[in-house]
Image (cartoon, rainbow, N blue to C red):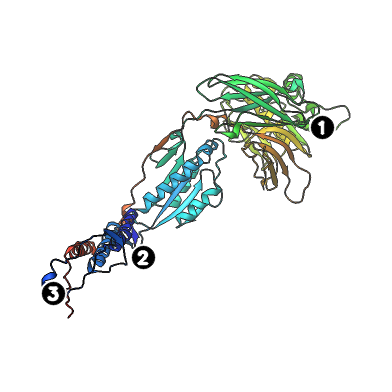
């Protein structure tokens, strides 16, 4: 088995070989004088009358002894070791996929390369694993080759928004095993858990970028309020260029941005244009420098209400606040029903519906919520339910709210059941139930047949079947085609989503804007190194060092001594 060298820098000593060879090429060129008289030999001793000159290589004992000494010393200094059974280790690099790593991408690659060189000096055989912090499926690379591992990093592009690194770190720890090493490459120390080996490659950068859009419904579907955030420590005057499909020269808009604040302005899409691209000046973080807008019309949702007047007033306000929602016209077929459940099980209609309990028995207790997209992030502590209805959830229902052990709200297919009399509670004065019903109504709108349009933040979850084709066109014209996994991409671009199979009618058309303003703040980025862990004792225990190193060292010094001894003079006399 070939040895592993724990000190590869020792091989620089081999440069002494061409130096020694050059010295032995460089000789004194002497004059030759023939004589037959012995007493003249001393007077005609060779002298360097013409200086040094290049001549043929003079092979001598001194030459070979010096070469041997260099080879032996290099071998000893390189400290070879032979791995035994169980001496290998797995080293896992977790590269932070956050978008604010993009300006430091090359620094991250260099950090991985430097750490690999340091780890290899230990002489332990290594299996390298490179993975992203939000990677799914196979890692970027797994194998023993440093060159192939670094080449695989060409595929790594940090584009994600804020996310939890803990799942990736747990996976890395499991892959590395008890004798392995996990190493996090990130841009800020805030993301490094206690005890995790990490290396920071960031630094503070000045950045200004788009931070969000809000439709101004009163002004029509092509009007927005646009936010720009200055993440720089100093005030900034910036100019926004606006490009439309009209063929006109880009419009210009100047903004004064105070440090660390958000500035808003309103923009209306010209009547003759269906799209617009707003651009900020180029800086170190281009992800938030462009904002793509499309004129969109929400899918119309006709709502029929068969609930008491008091509840009807509240939900009429909700309907009026949601784009595309309106009361059902006379003689039309509604898309969403709001009604009271008259029977114990509230026989579900065939359409989407919100069903309220008509009456209930007295009940007291705190309201608790299950984890669900309709309830996530909502505070239910202020909801008071004095009576609970007699409806019961079906076998396939997903319970959302409980009061004690009694189900208070659940989803069953396309129907949301609210198992309490709305008028007898304070639900119209607490945000949580209103937001939950609003979310449900929006999900009904998203699931209506036909193409949906919109300008949505990156990473938005859509209630559309996964597995279809997602086509994203970047602002520069680059076209990417991937499989839709239920979530919109994080990067800015125009997006089309097609259903699984051969469907040619898109489920969604619109734009995605970079929504994670936290990624544009580089004030906490820094360069740091918590240090590489030492190789595990169990791995080192199986490494066998060269037992003859003292002998090679002694032979090297002996070769040097022999090379310094003067040669035996060769005096021959010709008659």
Identify whether 22 is placed above or below 572.
above
Label pair 2/1, CB-CB below 8 angstroms: no
Q: State the residue position of label 2.
A: 2
Label of residue 334 in the image: 1
Dot 3: element: loop
394 and 506: which is toward the camera: 506
293 and 136: which is toward the camera: 293
409 and 79: which is toward the camera: 79
Front label number (2 vs 3): 3
Q: Quadrant of residue 549?
A: bottom left
- Residue 151 spot, x, y in % from top left: 51, 52
- Residue 284 spot, x, y in % from top left: 54, 33
Q: State the residue position of label 3.
A: 37
Dot 2: element: loop
**Dot 2 alpha-carbon crowd within 10 angstroms: few under 14, some 14 to 19, many 20 or more:** few
Identify whether 332 is placed above or below 61.
above
Q: CA distance from mark 1 to mark 3?
A: 132 Å
Q: In terms of sequence position, does the residue under pointer 2 or pointer 3 come before the other? A: 2
- Residue 372 spot, x, y in % from top left: 61, 36
Front label number (1 vs 3): 3
- Quarter of the image where the N terminus is located: bottom left
Q: CA distance from mark 2 to mark 3?
A: 62 Å
Could you tell whether 301 is left or right of 252 in the image? right
- Quarter of the image where the C terminus is located: bottom left
**Dot 3 alpha-carbon crowd within 10 angstroms: few under 14, some 14 to 19, many 20 or more:** few
User: Among all residues in the image, which is located at the extreme left?
Assistant: 39
Label pair 2/3, CB-CB below 8 angstroms: no
Q: CA distance from mark 2 to mark 1?
A: 78 Å
Q: In terms of sequence position, does the residue under pointer 1 or pointer 3 come before the other? A: 3
Q: Residue at x 67, y 30 (%)?
A: 439
Dot 1: element: loop
């Amino acid at each position: 088995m070939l040895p592993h060298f724990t000190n590869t820098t020792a091989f620089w000593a081999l440069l002494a070989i061409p130096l020694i060879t050059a010295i032995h090429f460089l000789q004194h060129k002497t004059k030759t004088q023939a004589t037959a008289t012995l007493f003249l030999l001393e007077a005609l001793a060779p002298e360097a009358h013409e200086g040094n000159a290049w001549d043929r290589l003079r092979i001598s004992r001194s030459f070979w002894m010096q070469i041997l000494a260099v080879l032996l010393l290099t071998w000893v200094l390189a400290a070879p070791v032979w791995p035994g059974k169980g001496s290998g280790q797995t080293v896992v690099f977790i590269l932070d996929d956050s978008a604010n790593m993009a300006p430091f991408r090359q620094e991250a690659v260099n950090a991985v390369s430097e750490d690999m060189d340091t780890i290899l000096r230990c002489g332990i055989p290594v299996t390298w694993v490179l993975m992203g912090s939000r990677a799914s499926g196979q890692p970027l690379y797994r194998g023993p080759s440093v060159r192939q591992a670094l080449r695989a990093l060409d595929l790594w592009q940090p584009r994600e928004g804020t996310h939890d690194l803990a799942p990736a770190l747990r996976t890395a720890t499991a892959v590395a095993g008890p004798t392995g090493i996990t190493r996090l490459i990130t841009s800020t120390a805030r993301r490094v858990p206690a005890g995790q080996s990490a290396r920071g490659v960031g630094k503070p950068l000045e950045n200004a970028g788009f931070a969000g859009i809000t439709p101004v419904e009163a002004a029509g579907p092509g009007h927005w309020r646009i936010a720009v955030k200055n993440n720089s420590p100093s005030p900034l005057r910036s100019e926004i260029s606006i490009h439309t499909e009209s063929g006109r020269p880009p419009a210009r808009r100047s903004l004064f941005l105070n440090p660390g604040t958000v500035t808003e302005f309103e923009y209306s899409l010209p009547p003759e244009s269906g799209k617009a691209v707003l651009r900020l000046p180029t800086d170190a973080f281009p992800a938030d420098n462009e904002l793509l807008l499309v004129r969109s019309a929400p899918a119309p949702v006709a709502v029929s209400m068969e609930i008491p007047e008091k509840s009807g007033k509240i939900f009429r306000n909700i309907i009026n606040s949601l784009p595309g929602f309106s009361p059902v016209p006379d003689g039309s077929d509604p898309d969403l029903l709001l009604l009271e459940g008259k029977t114990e099980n509230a026989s579900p209609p065939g359409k989407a519906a919100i069903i309220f309990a008509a009456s209930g028995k007295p009940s007291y207790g705190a309201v608790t919520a299950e984890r669900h997209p309709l309830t996530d992030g909502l505070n239910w502590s202020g909801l008071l339910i004095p009576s609970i209805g007699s409806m019961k959830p079906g076998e396939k229902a997903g319970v959302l709210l409980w009061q004690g052990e009694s189900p208070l709200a659940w989803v069953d297919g396309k129907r949301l059941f609210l198992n309490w009399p709305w008028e007898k509670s304070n639900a119209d004065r607490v945000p949580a139930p209103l937001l939950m019903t609003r979310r449900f109504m929006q999900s009904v709108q998203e699931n209506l047949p036909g193409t949906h349009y919109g300008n949505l933040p990156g990473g938005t979850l859509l209630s559309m079947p996964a597995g279809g084709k997602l086509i994203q066109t970047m602002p520069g014209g680059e076209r990417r085609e991937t499989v839709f996994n239920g979530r919109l991409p994080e990067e800015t671009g125009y997006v089309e989503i097609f259903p699984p199979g051969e469907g040619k009618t898109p489920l969604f058309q619109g734009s995605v804007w970079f929504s994670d303003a936290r990624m544009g703040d580089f004030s906490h980025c820094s360069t740091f190194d918590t240090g590489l862990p030492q190789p595990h004792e169990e791995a080192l225990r199986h490494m066998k060092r060269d037992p003859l190193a003292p002998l090679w060292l002694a032979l090297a010094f002996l070769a040097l001594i022999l090379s310094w001894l003067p040669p035996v003079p060769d005096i021959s006399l010709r008659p």
